[in-house]
């Protein structure tokens, strides 16, 4: 066979014969987003309810303060008004502050800390895990020993130590929670990256002289994004729980800024006389955490590569 004929045959090796005998293009494998649309999300009622709740909470945090006229920090003489009081749908607290306004305004700080710390954890964890899984050898050993050392501490203890060292506040809370949650994502990213690094297309890219940053960003990361995205969403629930818990302990968002965690702490002495002051912010925090877990499970099922041929 001549060189021209061999090249011509190689060009059509993956072609599929059409009805008329001519070659047609082989069907392309659907991309990740296409597979996500084919498989669908929200296939169970808990997942659908969780998606709706998360979207609603985000909308409340973004536009709710613009729609509530009451000042969440203004103290009045109308203390401990019950549900349905004129001008105060959910009543007031012991300082006469409108409870509905405090709940609406309190969503934004909690969600900001949860999303910001999760983003920090995702960047740190994914970056460390990608580099360790791709490089292997001594680089992987050093990086993963640092990760194992961080995982040896209970997460909540590590968060408290970091926040206490930096001082209470939003910035220290974001950094503390983000750093404490990064090791878990790093281990997942390392395992996924090591698996992809051994595949033929990565070996070919390395032999072809493709630079490491391009391989990590354009080859490996898109192929491990599915499990990582699902885990990041589930990490969001842990970050929200940490943020609320530290605010309850006085190490998080500081008063007078309304925050669901601090609202639970401030209202606990009225647990029997006015349980709404504790139950409402605690229930919203719990529902947010549970919804994040259901959404993470839903995304993991939808993005599972085993589920698509």
Image: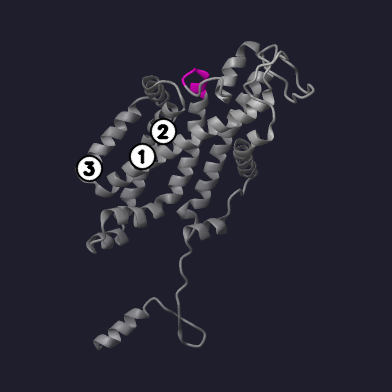
Q: Secondary structure at mark 3?
A: helix
Q: Which residues are magenta?
A: 245-251
Dot 2 crowding, Cα within 10 Å, few <14, some 14–19, many 20+: many
Q: Indicate which disc residue 173 carries.
A: none
In this picture the colour scheme is one colour
Q: Nearer the viewer, residue 262 or 227?
A: 262
CA separation in Å, label 3 and label 2: 23 Å
Dot 1 crowding, Cα within 10 Å, few <14, some 14–19, many 20+: some
Q: Which residue is mark 3?
A: 139
* Residue occupying the point 59% across, 28% down: 106
The label nearer to you, 1 versus 3, is 1
Q: Secondary structure at mark 2?
A: helix
CA separation in Å, label 2 and label 1: 8 Å
Can the viewer see residue 238? no
* Residue occupying the point 74% across, 24% down: 88
Can the viewer see residue 140? yes
Q: Which residue is mark 2?
A: 178
* Residue 41 picture location, percent across and down: 58, 50
* Residue 243 picture location, percent across and down: 49, 27
Q: Earlier in the sequence, mark 1 or mark 3?
A: 1
Q: Which quarter of the picture shows residue 209? A: bottom left
* Residue 69 picture location, percent across and down: 69, 30
Quarter holding the N terminus is bottom left
Is residue 189 left or right of 20 when viewed as pictured? left
Tell me whether circle 2 and circle 1 mark residues in contact (CB < 8 Å).
yes
Dot 3 crowding, Cα within 10 Å, few <14, some 14–19, many 20+: few
Q: Residue furthest left?
A: 138
* Residue occupying the point 31% across, 41% down: 128
Instruction: Give the vertical position of 148 relative to 250 (above or below).
Output: below
Q: Earlier in the sequence, mark 3 or mark 2?
A: 3
* Residue 298 picture location, percent across and down: 55, 45
């Amino acid at each position: 066979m001549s060189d021209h004929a061999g090249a011509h045959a190689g060009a059509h090796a993956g072609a599929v014969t059409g009805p008329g005998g001519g070659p047609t293009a082989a069907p392309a494998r659907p991309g990740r987003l296409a597979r996500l649309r084919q498989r669908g999300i929200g296939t169970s009622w808990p997942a659908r309810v969780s998606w709706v709740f998360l979207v609603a909470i985000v909308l409340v945090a973004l536009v709710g303060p613009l729609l509530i006229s009451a000042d969440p920090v203004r103290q009045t003489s109308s203390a401990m008004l019950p549900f349905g009081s004129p001008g105060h749908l959910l009543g007031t607290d012991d300082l006469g502050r409108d409870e509905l306004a405090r709940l609406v305004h309190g969503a934004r700080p909690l969600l900001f800390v949860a999303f910001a710390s999760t983003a920090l954890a995702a960047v740190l964890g994914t970056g460390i895990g990608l580099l360790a899984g791709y490089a292997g050898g001594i680089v992987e050993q050093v990086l993963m020993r640092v990760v194992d050392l961080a995982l040896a501490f209970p997460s909540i203890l590590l968060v408290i130590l970091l926040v206490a060292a930096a001082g209470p506040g939003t910035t220290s809370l974001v950094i503390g929670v983000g750093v404490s949650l990064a090791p878990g994502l790093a281990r997942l990213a390392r395992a996924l990256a090591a698996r992809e690094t051994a595949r033929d297309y990565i070996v070919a890219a390395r032999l072809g002289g493709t630079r490491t940053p391009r391989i990590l960003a354009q080859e490996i990361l898109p192929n491990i994004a599915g499990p990582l995205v699902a885990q990041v969403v589930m990490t969001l629930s842990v970050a929200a729980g940490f943020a609320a818990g530290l605010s309850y302990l006085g190490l998080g968002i500081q008063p007078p800024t309304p925050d669901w965690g601090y609202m639970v702490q401030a209202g606990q002495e009225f647990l029997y006389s006015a349980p709404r002051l504790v139950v409402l912010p605690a229930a919203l925090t719990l529902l947010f955490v549970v919804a994040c877990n259901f959404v993470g499970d839903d995304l993991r099922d939808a993005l599972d590569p085993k589920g698509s041929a």
